[in-house]
Every structure is written in C-alpha cells, then in structure tokens.
Amino acid sequence: MREDTRTILFAAIVCITCSLLLSGTAAGLKSLQEANKEFDVKRNIVKAFGIDIGEMKRPEIESTFKKHVTEETTGELPIYTWTDDGTETPSKYAFPISGKGLWSTLYGYLSLNADLETIAGISFYKHGETPGLGAEIEKDWFLSQFTGKRLYADGASTEFVVAKPGYAQGDSAVDGISGATLTGKGVEALLRKDATAYAEYFNSIKGNRE
C-alpha cells in the first residue's frame, strides 16, 4: 500500500471514529437534557401545589410527584391533580400559565385549593426577565403572596391585580415588584387569561359535587 494511500485511510478512520463519538455524545447529552427538562416540569408542578421543595433532593421530588400528582386533560387543556395520602379525591388542582412579560414569555403553574376558588400555590420556571427586577417573579417573597388569594368568585375569574408595591388591596391582589411594572402587568394579564380559560372546567367539577 502506498504511503499516501495509508495516510488517507488513516485520516478517514480518524474522522469516522470522531464522528461516531460525537454522535454518541450528542445523543447522550440530548437524553440527559430531556430528562432534566422533564424533572424541572415536575419540580415546578410540585412547588405550585404549595409544597416547600427547598430542602428536597431530586429523588424525593420525583417520588412526591409520582405519589401525589396525576396528569389529566380536559379538552385541549392540561390539568394536574394532587391527592393526599389515604384519599382518592383530589384536594388541589393545578394548570399551566403563560403570557408576555417585559422581555419574554413567562411560563409557570398555578394551583387551586379544593374550593376551586383560592390559590394554593404558584411557580414560574422559564422566563427572560431582567435579573434583580422582573426576574423576581420566581422568588419566594413574590410567589408566597398568592397563597390564599381568590382567583375565582361566583363561577367566574376575578379581576386579579398585581398592584404597585405596597398598594395591594383585597383578596384578589398582590404587591408587584419595584422597577418591574410591565412584568407585573404581564403576570396580571396571564392570570386573568388562563383563569378564564379554565373557568368552565372548574365550574363543571363544582356542578358534579352538588
């Protein structure tokens, strides 16, 4: 075999080997990314149900989701239910929320208590808002305000308000974030929009209870 032929053959083998290795690595990374993405969804759904996940490790969160959370679909609208230990009837209901902020689309989950009117918890897991300003929507000090607030009344969604900091009044309002008025208005708008979209579903559940 001529020297130049051996060189070309060697280079080809190296290229093929590298390509196979890169393909395998990319496939492995994609699988890992998908698994992490799926876990992040579960993590935020559990958090939205009002569960303190601060000290929980991944296996515990996975176990909590599997034990208590069931995913359902009502028409084209996804819904998640939370069932307490020793019971069969859901005690909380969660649904995805999304809408425009200042710089990005905000994605999260919100849950209702068994009364199907008051908020049990909320979480935001994806956005591109300004760090230290709009990005505060994912911080506990902001999210904790929503617990117990009224999202529905008399079978319809409330005019929920994200107010100027320090000016929230009533049981359907929370304080906004200083310097992030437009992000707060985005949260206000998406809550009203998605609450309206799910109103008929929750009314049907109430009807079945009567």
Image (tube, rainbow, N blue to C red):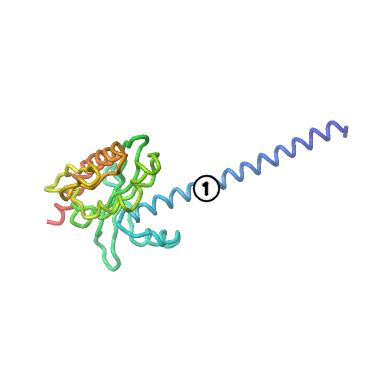
In the picture, the quarter occupied by the N terminus is: top right
Q: Position of residue 185 (x, y in %)?
A: 26, 38
| Residue 150 as seen in the image, left or right of residue 38 | left
Give the camera-side residue of 186 and 43: 186
Q: Residue at x 79, y 33 (%)?
A: 8
Give the image location of residue 163, x and y in percent: 22, 43
Which residue sits at x=53%, y=45%?
30
Q: Quadrant of residue 75?
A: top left
Mark 1 — residue? 31
Q: Residues within 10 Å of mark 1 (few under 14, many from 20)?
A: few
Q: Nearer the viewer, residue 23 or 179?
A: 179
Query: Which amino acid, by three-letter code, is at mark 1?
Result: Ser
Give the SS element for disc 1. helix
Q: Quadrant of residue 26?
A: top right
Q: Nearer the viewer, residue 121 or 93?
A: 121
Q: Is residue 182 left or right of residue 127?
A: left
- Look at the image and tell me in which quarter the C terminus lies: bottom left
